[in-house]
Image (cartoon, grey):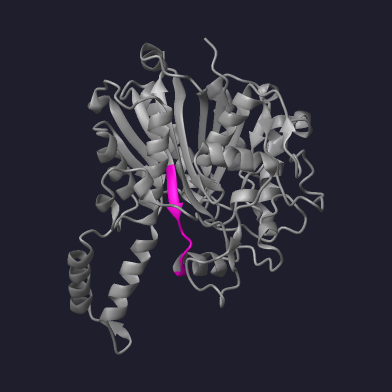
Amino acid sequence: MANRVVITGMGMVTPLGIGIETNWPALLRGESGLDYITLFDASEYPTKVAGEVRGFDVCRFVDDPARFEYAGRNTRFAVAASKMAWEDGGLNGAELDPFRVGVYLGSGEGQLDFDNFVNAIAFAWTNEAVDVAEFCQRGQATFHERRELEQEPSMPAGHVAALFRACGPNSNCLTACAASSQAIGEATETIRRGDADIMISGGTHSMIHPLGMAGFNLLTALSTYDGDPKGASRPFDLSRDGFVLGEGAGIVILEELSHAKKRGAKILAEVAGYGSTADAYRITDAHPDGRGAIEAMKGALADAGVAPADVDYINAHGTSTVVNDKVETLAIKRVFGDYAYEVPISSIKSMLGHLIAAAGAVEIITCTLVLRDGIVPPTINYQDPDPDCDLDYVPNQAREVAVDVALSNSFGFGGQNIALVIRRFAE
């Protein structure tokens, strides 16, 4: 019989602030963390709004800040969120077998990755071509100047492992918008099969830089809304015109149940079900019939042993793109039937923007807090109903709802689909 997996600690860094105690009340108030971009000059870009993390200083979370002086922005976010989750889980000073503690993150590139790479190319650019020798020389010089080049998305997982002496399984996945949900699902499987007692899992990402913005603009995926920045992300609304980039990190401590009970840990929720599929369709578009999303949700429900009617809340992927919101709505209807019109659904991307590889983990934390407090955060900026999106999206105001089972959806570019079932813990 597979081991049961519970959540015993949580930490988050988002455009709404640092930590659960800051983010959760703001989400319930329906506050927006979106504003005009300050990390670079976006005046010539079609999109000028993002969800930036402001007032963040990794020195608040580490004893040796010099160690992270040259670390990427994504790594710093991951370190802070992991520190908060570790402390929330009561693990400071705990006697642990380091080889039974692992890390599984969904992590994307950091800002330094692109800056360093582009600068090296610019240095080596001659006569409309790149001089490879000059490129290598510049790369070597930059390495010596900065001592560390965070060119790999797996760097945050390495830093987190070193910080907590987590010598067990260490992995990173970069399946776009589904990454941190997939990481949590795979970390759960690691514990279920007995390969670890504790997994530090979740995701981190920061794509608010010229290359990230230009790429998504070229795909016409980003909102070009030119009104109040706080109204730019409008999931399920008829006027939605694309997602808004955000940045941040969400980390959970996943733990094998008997291990958690033995050390007297507080148990926040149980990860009960995990479903994973691929659309096998197009790189940027969801399958129009929602086939991958449907099977991911069905798989997660079956894995958890719950029926659709047992689900009390759905945290939607809800990106605010025309296609995604329409297809996700269709998929929910196919899985839940008539009950789809009764279950409350919300998208916190309306307030945070899309944290890309970190989005799913922050949404799993949200589901856990919904279980704890019996309050569902709203989908803000919902003003004009879309006939193709006609479910209960908890518009504009939080709602008290008794929730024992929550479903969280994450669908990524490339056709990755992840669904997770989070359940109130019961013996």
Q: Residue furthest bottom?
A: 127
Q: Quadrant of the N terminus?
A: top left
Q: Residue at x 54, y 36 (%)?
A: 21
248 left or right, relative to 79: right
Task: Provide residue 314's location: percent of width, then percent of height.
Answer: 65, 34
What segment carries the magenta color?
Answer: 203-210
The number of callouts visible is: 0
- As displayed, is residue 317 above or below residue 272? below
350 left or right, relative to 250: right
Q: Is 239 a magenta residue?
A: no
In front: 108, or 418? 108
Q: Residue at x 29, y 24 (%)?
A: 93
* Quarter assignment of residue 123: bottom left
Task: Provide residue 112's location: percent of width, then percent of height.
Answer: 35, 62
* Quarter assignment of residue 258: top left
Task: Provide residue 53's location: percent of width, then percent of height.
Answer: 50, 54
Look at the image and tell me whether residue 420 can be seen: yes
